[in-house]
Image (tube, rainbow, N blue to C red):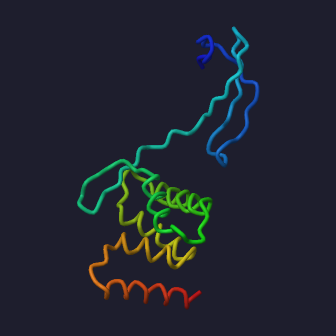
Amino acid sequence: MLCPQCHNNSSRVVDSRPADNGNAIRRRRECEKCGYRFTTFERVEATPLLVIKKNGNREEFNRDKILHGIMRAAEKRPVSMDKITDIVDEVERKIRAVGGTEVSSQLIGEYVMNILADVDDVTYIRFASVYHEFKDMQSFADELQELMQRNKQK
């Protein structure tokens, strides 16, 4: 590992500890030449994941898109940023558990909606209205009816 101070490539690990909920290792290092201390992170390199859009186009998976979509749906709702981040983490875990290198945007949307239905009804409906692209009031009413049925079964 190159020292950021003197660019020597010989350093020793002073301390290691888990980071990012066990998904990374944080290492404190010390340059053997100049003694400068710096921090590095070691992560497992995830296999690239492609999302197949409704129109058939493929694009690289971007968890920020899910995050921003949920944030917009949860605007002015009692859903904390920590909860939103937890939802995104859970969705990413689920799609990576499916395996493979491609996943449909429909599957991602369904995972998000299944979780949101248990978190906040209004956030769920807002997300569903964008995801399902409601064309008329009947489509919207059908989705509301489905949510109400789901809540009765709890």
Q: Left of 129 or right of it: where is 89?
A: right
The residue at the far front in this view is: 76
Q: Quadrant of residue 36?
A: top right
Residue at 49%, 43% in the rendered image: 46
x, y percent for residue 118: 56, 76
Q: Left of 13 or right of it: where is 103?
A: left
Residue at 52%, 72% in the rendered image: 116
Q: Quadrant of the N terminus?
A: top right
The residue at the far top in this view is: 33
The residue at the far left in this view is: 55
Q: Quadrant of the C terminus?
A: bottom right
State the count of labels.
0
Residue at 51%, 68% in the rendered image: 74
Q: Nearest the camera: 123 or 26?
A: 123
Q: Nearest the camera: 148 or 69?
A: 69
x, y percent for residue 94: 50, 60
> Measured along the vertical axis of the image, is residue 115 above or below residue 140?
above
Residue at 37%, 57% in the rendered image: 103
x, y percent for residue 87: 55, 62
x, y percent for residue 147: 47, 84
> Measured along the vertical axis of the image, is residue 8 above or below residue 118?
above
